[in-house]
Amino acid sequence: HRTFFMFAVVLLDTTTEEKLDWTRYPFGPQANTPGWVEESFTNFDKGINWRSYVVCDVAYTNVNNWLWTPFIERGPANRMYIEINFTTRDCSLFPGNALSCKETFSLLYYEFDAATKEPPPWEPDSYKLIGRIAAGEGRFNTNTEVVINTEVKSIPVTKKGVYFAFRDQGACISILAIKVYYISCPEISVNFAHFPATPTGREVALIEQTRGICVANAVKIAQPTFLCKGDGKWYLPTGGCHCKPGYQADTDKQECKECPIGKFKHEAGSHACEPCPEHSKASDYGFTECRCDPGYFRAEKDPKKMPCTQPPSAPQNLTVNFVDQSTVILSWNAPHMQGGRSDTTYRVDCDSCSMGVKYIPNTEIFNDTKITITGLNAVTTYRFQVFAENGVSSLVGKSEYVDITVTTEASVPSLVSNVRITSVKSSELSISWDAPDIGTGGDNDLVERYEVRCYPRYDDATNATVIQTSELSATFKGLKPSTDYAIQVRAKTTRGWGEYTPVIFKKTPHAMGLDYVGEDDNMQVRIIAGAIVAVVVLLVIIIIMTVLILRSRASDECNKKQPSDCDTLEYRNGEVHCKMDSSPIVTTHTNNKSKSSLTTPLFTPAVGVAAAGAGSAGGAGARSYVDPHTYEDPNQAVREFAREIDAGYITIEAIIGGGEFGDVCRGKLKLPPDGRTEIDVAIKTLKPGSADKARNDFLTEASIMGQFEHPNVIFLQGVVTKSNPVMIITEFMENGSLDTFLRANDGKFQVLQLVGMLRGIASGMQYLAEMNYVHRDLAARNVLVNAALVCKIADFGLSREIESATEGAYTTRGGKIPVRWTAPEAIAFRKFTSASDVWSMGIVCWEVMSYGERPYWNWSNQDVIKSIEKGYRLPAPMDCPEAIYQLMLDCWQKERTHRPTFANLTQTLDKLIRSPDTLRKIAQNSVRPPAHNPYYVTSHTAAQAAAAAMPPGPAAGTAGPFVDIVGHQAHQQAQSAIAVPVMPPGAGRSLHYHTHAATHALPHQQSPLTYPNWVPFSHFG
């Protein structure tokens, strides 16, 4: 075994002392004998000049001479050693003269816990004898040279220190040098563990075990220990440490050093750092794992030594090998690019496969390049997607795929024949048909049942109402009057479904119309009509009472709050109820028709767009929104516009909020065909026991959402109406509402990111406007944000279809309006258009650029309305680009025909995003116009006009800047003239001519939230 040598720690060495002056006995004039005498021992040949003690009282009797060392502290020593260099004279040198001649002396010691100023005790009984020391090398006489003897003794020690004593009883000796020390195993590092210096044990044969600690940048693999033997030598190391990841071992220096650039070490050990594998690099020292190059990835289970890889490309040459009425066999070739891996697998998705479809292989992912799909419906078109994936595909988030469309064959050789209408009513159709001619097909062609589908003529057949029956007739109920319906029939045999018959069309008559064929009893018609009228009258009475009660409660709740706490105005009896000094629209310089051309929109509207209303864009053939309220039965609207989902495929995980109808939850939706793939969804549930009106409103919202499909409009996955609770399933937006998200991340985004959010909102609203759809409640709180910061329009509770008869306006029949987001004409006349949505878009822009600040702060609704009517607009948010603020001002044009369309807004935001330099200039809420403005004048008359045009401030106790501002300006009028910009008739709406009111608040009033710098427009309208 490997050993390491000792070293001695010296506690006393007389060879280094110039004077000893030890305690002696006897000593002094009264002593019976001369005793121990201090003198110098010199040997110039050997370079010796030591202070020593000599005694030679051989001519005396009863000699008892004592010599004590000073008190020697032991420190950490467990065993102390004393080394004595001395000489002895032979007694033969004193023939006849020596009364007591000896050739030995005694060495004793006394342990003590504290040193004192008193001499050490000299009683022989207090000392322990170490031994009698005699000359081992020889004695000298007059005829011989001086012989120096060396004696080493050791003692175990436990107390603070020790006195050593020399006792002479008649010898002639010289003690030339004394050295006191202890032995220690030296400080050392072994196996990358550090061991401190360790004194030997109390006994020579005793071994001391020492525990080591790992050197810097090393980790323990087993407790490091080392044995310190009594001779001061290390022996038998065990355990030790390894250099941690990112560090390699220097065995000679017992150090752990960082891996150099370009190398890595991913686990603890004594091995060296390794070069980075292919497609990765280590750009700094001490890397534990090389980072993959852009476009390359390393799976979690991949060895760190493995090169970085890529996901595979799409499969090649997807082919249909076989198809019949219920089975499809597909095959393909492996991707041409495997990404540097050998674990490529495949996955097949089917858009419209039912739960009964089976796959062979029956695992979700597989290695074969062939799959068999069974259990399909006959004469049905399916789209199959074959994905290629490997171990790093999940890190990319998108897998490459190839798709193919396949139509299964018919299973019945002949069609159902002679399909005919047997009865038609306003909400009911009855049909019958003849069985197909099976000829000699045998039992396999016997018809098991028939399937009949009925759907509006211009609707998609996939949303049809379906009846399955074994009879040769069927009746559809709950249809809409005055509607063309398409009807088709097909038969099913043991081989599968046959083809549908050619479509036949039939239009239902007006409500209360006579039957087409069959029953026409006038008395029965009169009874039904009377019952319907009675039910309608009763429902109207119930609805009126309910509305009155709800409005009374809402009014009471609003009256309990401060005026600024109610963000909506309530309509009663067709009037706007708010405390105003004048009518909703007052005649001022802001809406004077003679000055309506003082500003020019940022956009140039297309010919005909302004006249038709900003929201009614869209070319010929564009898809239009259908108002679900036109349906007598909301369930029918849901069937047409939303997909029914089996509740068994939905898992509710947590409640994340509450809505008007019930709880809002986060959950999972299993996707067909096998239900193994899950996606996150938001789930709105209807409260159990809700009234029919609540259920109808709930389903109406789903019918609205189901008509939209756009990246910036919330997507409806489907509904659950056939079990309780009724649910609406939408895509899950991880970051919640836009206003809350912005407030939680105040100042964390770049301007370009905020403009990108606005572009998404504008694009979604453009899509809705082109579908002739008015939102009416566009606000940041009704915009949701997903994990990729994509903004999507949501909350369609107040939305309505645009009525072309009213120039694209929707007139509300009651309810509450969000004043701070609503255009002036919508507040005053209840005229909602896409142009009024554009006004709301301007407020949303302001919310986004101010990170969710509340528009108009804590002003009351009445003060907001008055200020807007007088031409005042919100100031630019802090650090808002001038181009974006100009966009807001154009959205807030008094005349709705002067506002841009959402298509204009989307195009402009696209241009700003593509030219980021245009966003560098920050909008300034200055109190004076530009110096180069040629219309800048100074007059007391203009100053008075400006002061009179200031908006009224809020009530006392709230944010009231304008009360103090106007007073402050009035006070300044007496001091000096105030500069007021005057706009000449016909001046353009350039940003350079936007004038700004002097909003100097008193010193104690200046606050960024409660005292904004409002921007008055003298040219709105």
Image: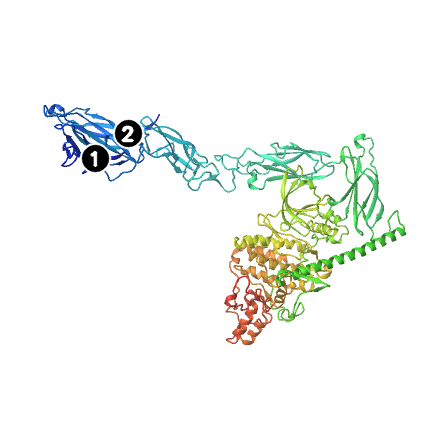
Circle 1: residue type = Thr
Residue 512 visible in image: no
The quadrant of the picture occupied by the N terminus is: top left
Which is nearer the eye, 209 or 488? 209
Residue 997 place in picture, x, y as percent: 55, 68
Label drawn at residue 155: 2
State how many labels appear.
2
Give the vertical position of 363 relative to 647 (above or below). Answer: above
Tag 2: Cα neighbours inside 10 Å, few (<14), some, or many (≥20)?
some
Residue 510 place in picture, x, y as percent: 82, 53
The quadrant of the picture occupied by the C terminus is: bottom right
Residue 129 place in picture, x, y as percent: 25, 28
Q: Locate residue 177 relative to residue 915 in the image: left or right.
A: left
Q: SS class of the residue under badge 1? A: helix
Please name the residue that numbered disc 1 is placed on. 14
Q: CA distance from mark 2 to mark 1?
A: 19 Å
Q: Earlier in the sequence, mark 2 or mark 1?
A: 1
Q: SS class of the residue under badge 2? A: strand
Tag 1: Cα neighbours inside 10 Å, few (<14), some, or many (≥20)?
some
Q: Quadrant of residue 398?
A: top right
Circle 2: residue type = Ile
